[in-house]
Amino acid sequence: MRQGDGRPTPGMCPTVTLEDGRDLGQIITLMNKSSPEHITAQFKHMVKKTQDPIERWENAIRHLSERYYQEPKSFSDRLTALFGPDSLVCKKLLEASRCTLTFEQNRQRFRIPCEVVNLEENDPEFQATLWHNSMFNPSIPGNIQVLAFIPRWSEAESESI
């Protein structure tokens, strides 16, 4: 998600840290529906409906704000992120297979240790992530990778900041 001025929404741009303490910077993550096939079809339709990136962006924002986030129980607890070809961050995450995502929002910090899984192109979460990102970026290259971050909730921490 992006704020009105185009910057990523802070809550969905966690800082990524490997277990050895290496900070990989921030990534943009997505929340996905537990069964994303229906919404993926809607995202795909919105992308293909118009070549105008402004119209596509406006339709996507309207749809996401009016419908997508209205039912919290419909979401999976797995987050996903799209990486371009030859992404060094993606490569390091796959090599490590574990990381911690640190979110900061409204003077609260959340640290969520996660398992990292590379999704295959036919995976419903891969497709949902690809088409979600395509609504906002009309020039996604081929050969992308989508990673899933599976929280280890028993190890998660939060604190006021």
Image: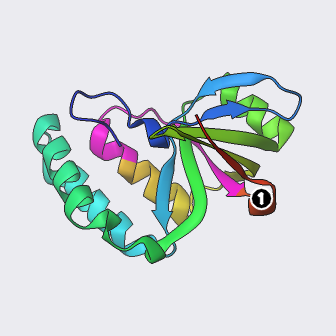
Q: Residue at x 45, y 32 (%)?
A: 141
Q: Is residue 82 left or right of residue 25?
A: left
**121 shown above or below 12:** below
**18 shown above or below 25:** below
Q: Residue 71 versus residue 150: which sits nearer the camera?
A: 71
Q: Residue at x 38, y 33 (%)?
A: 8
Colour style of the rendered protein structure: rainbow
Q: Position of residue 34 (x, y in %)?
A: 52, 73
Q: Position of residue 23 (x, y in %)?
A: 73, 23
Q: Is residue 120 left or right of residue 43?
A: right
Residue under circle 1? 152
Q: Amino acid at mark 1?
A: Arg
The image quadrant where one finds the C terminus is top right
Q: Is residue 102 left or right of residue 140?
A: right
Q: Is residue 135 magenta?
A: yes
The image quadrant where one finds the N terminus is top left
Q: Residue at x 57, y 40 (%)?
A: 103
Q: Position of residue 135 (x, y in %)?
A: 28, 46
- Region rendered in magenta: 133-150
Is residue 129 visible in the rendered image? The answer is yes
**3 shown above or below 38:** above
Count neighbours of disc 1 (C-alpha within 10 A) and say few if under 14, some if 14 to 19, many if 20 or more: few
Q: Residue 130 versus residue 6: which sits nearer the camera?
A: 6
Q: Quadrant of residue 121?
A: bottom right
**53 shown above or below 87:** below
Q: Element under label 1?
A: loop
Q: Is residue 85 magenta?
A: no
Q: Residue 160 versus residue 156: which sits nearer the camera?
A: 160
Q: Residue 59 versus residue 74: which sits nearer the camera?
A: 74
